Image (cartoon, helix red, strand yellow):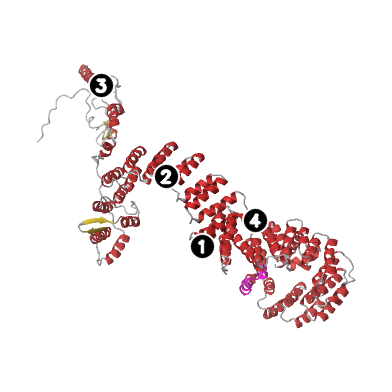
Amino acid sequence: MFQRQKDFGNQPTNYVPGRGRGAVGFITRSDIGPAKVDIGIEQDDDQNDYNDAKYDEWNGYSIPLFNIGDYDDEDREADLTYNSVDRKMEERRLKRLPNNLPEKPSIVNQFSDLKRELAKVGIDEWLSIPDIGDYSIKKKKQDKITPVPDSVIMSAQLQEKNLQTKAHDLNEIGEARGALLSLKLDKISDNVSGQSVVDKRGYLTSLASLPHLSENEIGDFKKARLLLKSVIQTDPKNSFGWIAAARIEELDGKLPAARSILAQGLQQAEDQEDIWIELSRLETPEKAKLILNKAIQTLPHSVKIWLNAVNKEQETQAKIKLLKRALEFIPNSVDIWKELVSLSSEQEALILLYKAVECIPKNLSLWLALAKLETYENAKAILNRARQNLPQEPTIWINAAKLEESAGKDKQTIAIVLSKGIKILKKNQVKIVKEDWLQEAEIAEKCSNINTCYAIVKAITLEEEKQSDNSWKQDFSQFEQRGSLHTARAIIAVEAERQNNYEIWKEYIEFERRHKEEDSQYFDQALDSAVTNLPQIEQFWIELILRKQELQSNYLEVFEKSPKTENILLTLSKLEKQQGNYEKASQYLQYIQDNLVPSDKTWIKMFKLILLMNKQIEFAEKILQKYPQSDKLWILCGQAKINQKDYQGARQIFEEAIKTLNNSLNVWLTYIKMECQQQLYTRARPLIDRAREKNPKSPQLWAQAIRLEIDAKNHKAAQFLLSKALQCCQLDGELWSLAIELEPKTTRKKKSADAVTLCVDNPYVYLSTAKVFLNEGKIEKAKRWLEKALILEPRLGDAWAYLYLIEKEILQQCISRRPKHGRLWQQAKETLNQKYDIEKILIEASKLAQKDIAKLE
């Protein structure tokens, strides 16, 4: 059977099947021909496309669905009607508005009349305005459940042990924490006869022990609120509970709630200054001023409130006015007086301080501040008045000493003032403690009152003069280690003058020599004082003469005052010889021969001077007859022959010296050295054997024998002699340094390590180790080893020569040390025929050091 098809009537004009649901513009398998049916109507594909891609869930299609029809009279009539209704409504609205408002008033204009009425609102009405609650209809955040960390569980378990409970799940842990909180509350509150009393200090201590309530550390403010709520209910008159509760809200970012809590607290504890100050801190500056103004009316004798009110003011004059008003209520407040003085000009401050000391005569700081602002004479009178009001205060006397120093008085005058002060303090039953006064001296030094520092030390030392106390050495070393050099200097200077002991003066001079680079004037003063107090000690005169020569001053003036002893004259002769004044140097030596009994040192100096002057040495035999046991004279005679290239004559002198002196190591070494310089090794070896028979354990002879074989390029013999030498002298640094240099390059470092271990703190071992690193190009390591060697032996010329290869800037430092030891240093001196020009010797020695490093290859 066939179903009957429904009749929908005639199709409308321009009807396209499927167009309403977008079913056009595609091809199916059953279609034949073009996909788009040509209906004979021109259409805009972009405007009339109702595809799903053009559809938006909020706005719908981008084109109107009913834009196909024409705009007829009915549409026009509808638009006119709607427009007339809109105009009518606008006219009605404008009639209700005042004439002075714009057509579209702003929010400010709408509420302007109400804002004018707010000017009539009082402070009480402001404070009584309740805070708005949270009436928003926004979706509330749901609490998220976060797993408890293991650390919380472990800490809870430890706490449960004290409660004799065991928690195995989160519920039990919560119960344990609640029990702990109840225990804390029990400690805070104490129920006595039905009344609950809170220990304020204990509560504050417990608050201080709590960690800061922040989101990262705790994040749970509810329990803190409950705890503080209990505290407030227990004792509502305690301001600290209200403040702590407000700060919890502040940490949680709820400032209105914090202000509300403090406002409630004011109703309960109006007489507590802290709650007023806390409330003013949380408010805006303008409201804070109003709150503090009311606080002043309530508590006019609270210094804290007055000072907080002053800090809220911006202008200086307003602050001064407020402080003066505060003094009407609290004239004996030191803090308010100090704040007022600090804000005033110098002239006004002076007037205020005079009033302050009248109101508070027992306050030391006000007296001292007044004395600082006055002139010298007035300051003395002020300190005397302060002393009358405070007779047991030593600080007044110390400030009096500083006043005298500012007036240009010397150390002795200041010390007299302090000595008088100590006696008066003793009469007033003040215990004088030396350590406290020395601390005051150190403070004076830090304040650049150097004379006062010295006077304090002298006064307290003279006060304890009767005591046989030797504790000054401990005090001296203690202050030197702390860097308080002026205090340490005053201690040892006063002790040296008091005891006038040679050892103390010597230690005093050594102290100044150690710190000469900081300030050399004190070193000069120490030398002058030493020769004044101990003029019979020639060592101090020699030190002073050398210091004057170093400063290029006239040291002959010192010589005129000094005693004419042999050592002083020899020092002057040496200085003249260094400057090339040989004739003047010989005059000093001649003075010794004519007026004193000369020792062999004088003849040696004379002999050296004659050699430098290239004069004849006819009197050499005469000198040797007087001092036949002086090996230096024999050596000088031999060197004189060597300088004349009379080697046979030198040999005769050395042989005769050996017979006369029996066994002089210096003569043997000089004799062997002469033969080695001539490369007469066959002559030198028997001499070494002869010398070793008499000195079998002399490391110098062993080292000379080894160097002889090295110079003769007989390394096997050198190694053999070295092994025998180390058996005889196992801990000699010079032999171990040779062992390092003779060792093959591959095992040289190991040999260096062995030498450093065996020969502890030996400069020659450190020097050879530095040479090894220099040979390998490790400059920094070599520099460190050379610096170690120079710390042990500052006058080791070879170490300075190697260090000069690394740093040319050490020249002045080397000159100040005046080196004189070392094989290369002595060779450089002989090559240049120089003894006192250290710069030339250093340069020549560094050239020899460069060659010496190359030999290590």
Front tag of 4 and 2: 2
Q: Amino acid at mark 2?
A: Ile
Q: Is 709 or 210 nearer to us in this picture?
A: 210
Mark 2 highlights which residue?
336
Query: Which label sits on residue 519?
Result: 4
Height in image: 812 above or below 650?
Answer: above
Label 3, on which residue? Answer: 97
Quarter of the image where the N terminus is located: top left
Say which label, 4 or 1, has the lower sequence index: 1
Q: Which residue is mark 1?
A: 433
Pointer 3 with pointer 1, Cβ within 8 A = no
Q: Which circle marks residue 771 in the picture?
A: none
Question: Of marks 2 and 3, which one's residue comes earlier in the chain?
Answer: 3
Query: Quadrant of the rendered structure where residue 830 is?
Result: bottom right
Task: Give how far across and how far down residue 857 sits, in percent.
Answer: 70, 67
Indicate the amino acid at tag 1.
Val
Task: Tell me which segment is drawn in magenta.
Answer: 750-768
| Principal secondary structure, stretch drawn in magenta | helix
